[in-house]
Image (cartoon, rainbow, N blue to C red):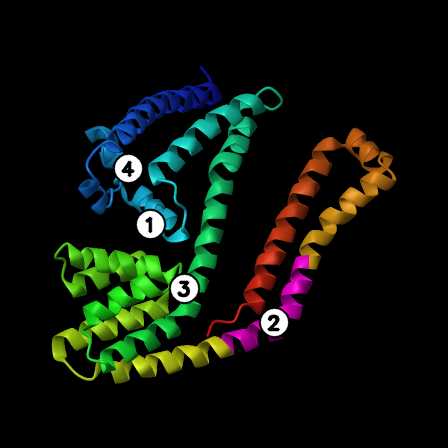
């Protein structure tokens, strides 16, 4: 048995076990809907309802990070279902690709379309959602400052943000309010928020300020108001930098797309050019094309690094 056959065998075994567990979990979800309304107050935990051996696998650090990525991206789908879809999709696409490619390339295509592409999409969704959340933070701080000066405690201010603010900051603060509703301390609930949204440094400052004030005391309204002014100025500076670097980013995108566009255009105008080249020395042409694609990707990354200015 060669290595490619062994890989396919392991993939299909994994798909079979995942499908069986997925069907069992789906049936449990249907039964859960018939239970009393009080059970809906509790948020379903990751890997809840799975068999012990599979729960241990799902609670591993890499999959926990992927679960955090899914939660912060705003997707409503459960992480378990996404993982099951990736596994099944890899098996199906790999099987179809093996009809036209060798087993190794077929597996690469299956992993690329079923794992790498969805992962990149989820990362992109998380980045956009966190960018919107960052823009909402000054308004959140303004609401908390006004509530504090009106005499409300910080827990009530967080609950007000959860009710009044739209997605994405509203649901995130609602999780904090729900955690405190189930007798979790304010500092612990905010720590979980900071851990979940670790890609937003501005939120870390807010959480740190509230936690320090809860221990040492002080005028929290003035601290948060200063943070709000600082964040507004920072956002203005980021917008100016984005406007100044727009030309460089556009040039990088054009230069990255141009070689592929020229390749397609030449094939449409005169297909015999590349056809003759492939017939003479296909190995050299494949190596040349591979190196060219690699250089384009490296150039795109370098240009992105040049025009990306951190504030």
The answer to whether any part of residue 303 appears in the image is yes
Q: Sequence order check: which comes first, mark 1 or mark 2?
A: 1
Q: Nearer the viewer, mark 2 or mark 3?
A: 3
**Label of residue 133 in the image:** 3
Q: Nearer the viewer, mark 3 or mark 4?
A: 3
At label 3, counting other C-alpha atoms closer than 10 Å, the crowd grade (few under 14, some 14-19, many 20 or more) is: many
Q: Which segment did they paint magenta?
A: 237-253
**Label of residue 58 in the image:** 4
Q: Report if residue 210 lies within the magenta region.
A: no
The secondary element bearing badge 2 is classed as loop
Q: Which residue is mark 1?
A: 68
**Magenta span main SS:** helix
- Separation of disc 2 and disc 3 at Cα? 23 Å
Residue 144 falls left or right of residue 109: left
Residue 10, located in which quarter of the rendered image? top left
The secondary element bearing badge 1 is classed as helix
Residue 156 falls left or right of residue 126: left
Q: Nearer the viewer, mark 3 or mark 1?
A: 3
Name the residue nearer the viewer: 85 or 2.
85
Q: Position of residue 275 (x, y in %)?
A: 81, 32
Position of residue 258 relative to residue 225, above or below, is: above
Marks 2 and 3: CB-CB under 8 Å? no
Marks 2 and 4: CB-CB under 8 Å? no
Q: Sequence order check: which comes first, mark 3 or mark 4?
A: 4
Q: Sequence order check: which comes first, mark 1 or mark 4?
A: 4
At label 1, counting other C-alpha atoms closer than 10 Å, the crowd grade (few under 14, some 14-19, many 20 or more) is: some
Q: Which residue is mark 2?
A: 245
Marks 1 and 2: CB-CB under 8 Å? no
Residue 30, located in which quarter of the rendered image? top left
- Separation of disc 2 and disc 4 at Cα? 42 Å
Q: Nearer the viewer, mark 1 or mark 2?
A: 1
Q: Report if residue 249 lies within the magenta region.
A: yes
């Amino acid at each position: 048995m060669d290595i490619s056959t062994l890989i396919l065998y392991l993939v299909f075994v994994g798909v079979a076990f995942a499908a069986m567990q997925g069907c069992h979990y789906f049936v449990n979800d249907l039964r859960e809907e018939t239970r009393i309304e009080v059970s809906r107050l509790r948020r379903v935990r990751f890997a809840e309802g799975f068999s012990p051996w599979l729960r241990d696998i799902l609670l591993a650090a890499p999959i926990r990070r992927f679960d955090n990525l899914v939660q912060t991206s705003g997707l409503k789908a459960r992480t378990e279902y996404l993982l099951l879809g990736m596994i099944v999709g890899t098996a199906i696409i790999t099987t179809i690709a093996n009809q036209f490619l060798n087993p190794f390339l077929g597996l690469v295509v299956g992993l690329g379309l079923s794992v790498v592409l969805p992962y990149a999409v989820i990362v992109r969704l998380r980045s956009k959602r966190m960018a919107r959340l960052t823009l909402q933070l000054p308004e959140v701080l303004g609401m908390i400052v006004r509530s504090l000066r009106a005499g409300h405690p910080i827990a009530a201010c967080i609950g007000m943000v959860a009710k009044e603010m739209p997605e994405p900051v509203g649901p995130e603060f609602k999780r904090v309010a729900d955690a405190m509703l189930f007798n979790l301390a304010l500092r612990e609930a905010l720590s979980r928020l900071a851990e979940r949204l670790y890609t937003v440094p501005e939120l870390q400052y807010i959480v740190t300020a509230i936690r320090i004030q809860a221990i040492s005391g002080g005028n929290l309204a003035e601290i948060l108001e200063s943070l709000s002014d600082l964040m507004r100025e920072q956002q203005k500076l980021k917008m100016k930098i984005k406007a100044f670097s727009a030309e460089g980013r556009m040039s990088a995108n054009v230069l990255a797309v141009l070689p592929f566009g020229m390749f397609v255009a030449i094939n449409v105008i005169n297909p015999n050019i590349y056809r003759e080249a492939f017939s003479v020395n296909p190995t050299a042409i494949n190596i040349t094309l591979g190196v060219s694609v690699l250089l384009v990707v490296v150039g795109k990354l370098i240009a992105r690094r040049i025009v990306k200015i951190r504030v």
